[in-house]
């Protein structure tokens, strides 16, 4: 099991400062790890769905957040996205913090593209990645609208390209 790398306090603070108020919004936390990001989103008023593959981590998130305050999925991200889509769930914010150095940046934008309809029209995808891993957006409906660097971590903010809105 790869060691969990929690989002740093500085990055966490910056993320929620950029996102602004979340009251009444929906927040999907992929690769939840410790659940720190989801806990902060809930504290700021968002309804949350967490996705964590590792059962021990998922159990820790459940203990931290409680059983009834959110939906928790203990499964692979691909399966979780299918699960959410089948239930017609949509999100204002989709946050993904995959393990660094495991090639997720070449796959994740395409995986999310398959489920682009789950992002609300004014929603945002935020991907936290290592500065050494370039984000691959070619052949996806996403455009990079902002990028912030915090030490070795990068927060990428993605939205649907305008042409994708027209086609949808």
Image (spheres, rainbow, N blue to C red):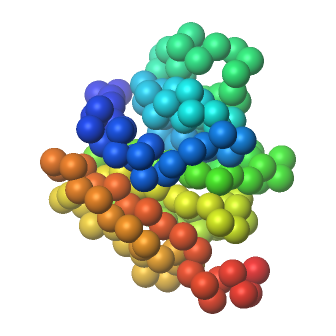
Residue drawn at (41%, 46%), measured in percent from left and top? 17
Where's residue 113, x and y in %?
A: 59, 69
Q: Name the quadrant of the N terminus.
A: top left
Q: Is residue 3 visible?
A: yes
* Towards the viewer: 31 or 12: 12
Check the image and report above or below for 50 versus 145. above
Check the image and report above or below for 5 versus 77. above
Where's residue 77, x and y in %?
A: 56, 45
Q: Residue 149 sits in which quadrant?
A: bottom left
Q: Name the quadrant of the C terminus.
A: bottom right
Residue drawn at (69%, 35%), measured in percent from left and top? 47
Left or right of 65 on screen, residue 121: right
Where's residue 62, x and y in %?
A: 59, 16
Q: How many marks?
A: 0
Q: Is residue 130 visible?
A: no
Q: Quick one: which residue is furthest to the top in this view?
A: 63
* Towards the viewer: 95 or 74: 95
Left or right of 95 on screen, residue 131: left
Left or right of 133 on screen, residue 98: right
Residue drawn at (49%, 30%), measured in percent from left and top? 40
Where's residue 133, x and y in %?
A: 25, 60
Residue drawn at (64%, 13%), measured in percent from left and top? 66
Q: Quick one: which residue is furthest to the right in this view?
A: 87
Q: Residue 26 sits in which quadrant?
A: top right
């Amino acid at each position: 099991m790869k060691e969990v790398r929690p989002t740093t306090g500085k990055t966490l603070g910056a993320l929620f400062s950029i996102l602004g108020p979340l009251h009444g919004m929906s927040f999907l936390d992929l690769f939840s790890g410790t659940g720190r990001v989801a806990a902060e989103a809930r504290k700021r008023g968002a309804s949350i769905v967490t996705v964590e593959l590792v059962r021990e981590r998922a159990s820790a998130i459940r203990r931290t957040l409680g059983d009834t305050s959110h939906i928790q999925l203990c499964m692979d991200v691909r399966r979780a996205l299918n699960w959410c889509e089948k239930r017609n769930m949509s999100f204002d914010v989709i946050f993904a913090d995959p393990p660094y150095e495991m090639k997720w940046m070449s796959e994740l934008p395409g995986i999310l593209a398959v489920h682009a309809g789950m992002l609300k029209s004014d929603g945002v995808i935020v991907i936290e990645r290592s500065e050494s891993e370039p984000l691959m957006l070619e052949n996806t409906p996403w455009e990079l609208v902002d990028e912030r660097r915090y030490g070795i971590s990068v927060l990428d903010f993605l939205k649907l390209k305008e042409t994708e809105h027209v086609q949808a």
